[in-house]
Amino acid sequence: MSKVHTGLEEATDRADDDVVSVLVAQHGMIKDLLAEVKSRDGEVKQRAFDVLRELLAVHEAAEEVIVRPAARDTAGKAETDARNQEEAEAARVLEELEKRDVDLPEFDLLFAKLERMVLEHAEREEQEEFPALRAGHTEDELRTMAHRLREAEETAPTHPHPMAAGSPKLQRLTGPFASMLDRARDRLGGT
C-alpha cells in the first residue's frame, strides 16, 4: 500500500466520520501538499509532487464515483456537472505536470495554475456541494458513503486519466483497469 493511502487512512479513517468530514480532511491534506511542493526543490519536490499527484487522482476518482451521484440528487445536475468539469480540467493540467521536470520554471507556472484550480474547486465543493449533500442525506447515509469512498480509494487510479476524469460512468468502467496499470507502474518506479 502506498504512503498516500496510509496517510488517507490515518487522517480519515474514523468509523463515526461522514463522507463530508472525510473529504474536508482530505482537502486539508491536499492544501498542505500544495504548499510542500511550492516550498521544495529537487528530489524532495518531486517526491512531494508524486504524493500530491496520487492523492488528487485517488481523491477525485473516488469522489466522482461515490459523491457525485448522491450530490446530483441534492445539489442538482448543474452543480455536479460543474464540479466534474473542474476535475476533468485539473486532471489535464496534472497530467501535463507529470511530464515536466519539477525544477524548471515552466513546472512552477503550470503548478500555480493547478493550485488555483484545486483550491477554487475545493472551496466550491465545501460551500455549495457538501452542504446540499448533508442536508439531503441522513447521518447513517453519510457514514455509509464515507465507507464506500474509502473502498473506492483503495482501487482508484493513482495517476490522472483525463479521458475518464469528470465522468462517474467512465470512472466506474475504466477506473479498475487504470488503477491496476497505475499501481504496477508505481511499484516499478515509474511516475
Image (cartoon, rainbow, N blue to C red):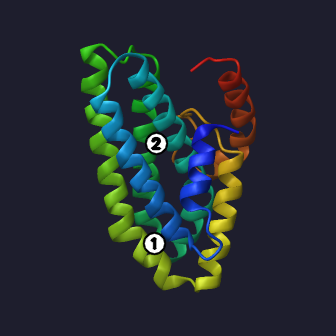
Q: Secondary structure at mark 1?
A: loop
Which sits earlier in the primary sequence, circle 2 or circle 1? 1
Relative side of 164 to 81, left or right? right
Query: What residue is pinned by disc 1?
Result: 76
- Residue at the image point whose x is 56% and y is 34% from the top: 161
Give the class, few, some or many, for how many residues have Cα within 10 Å of label 1's Cα (few <14, many ≥20): some
> Measured from the top left, where is residue 74 in percent x and y?
49, 77
Q: CA distance from mark 2 to mark 1?
A: 19 Å
Please give the label number shown on residue 156: none
Image location of residue 2, percent across then percent down: 65, 37
Identity of the residue drawn at 37% across and 56% down: 122
Q: Amino acid at mark 2?
A: Ala
Q: How many marks?
A: 2
Which residue sits at x=29%, y=31%? 38
Q: What's the residue type where badge 1 is placed?
A: Gly
Q: Is residue 53 above or below residue 84?
A: above
Residue indicated by mark 2: 88
Mark 2 vs 1: CB contact within 8 A: no
Q: State the image coordinates of residue 18 (x, y, percent, origin top left).
A: 56, 74
Which mark's residue is nearer the viewer, 2 or 1?
2
| Image position of 109 (left or right of 31) | left
Instruction: Identify the image quadrant of the C terminus.
Output: top right
Residue 148 relative to residue 55: left or right: right
The foreground one among 125 and 21 is 21
Check the picture and name the quadrant holding the N terminus. top right
Image x and y of residue 89, in percent: 40, 39
Which residue: 56% across, 61% down?
12
Foreground of the two, 64 or 56:
56
Q: In which quadrant of the rendered view does residue 173 lie?
A: top right
128 relative to 159 in the view: left or right: left
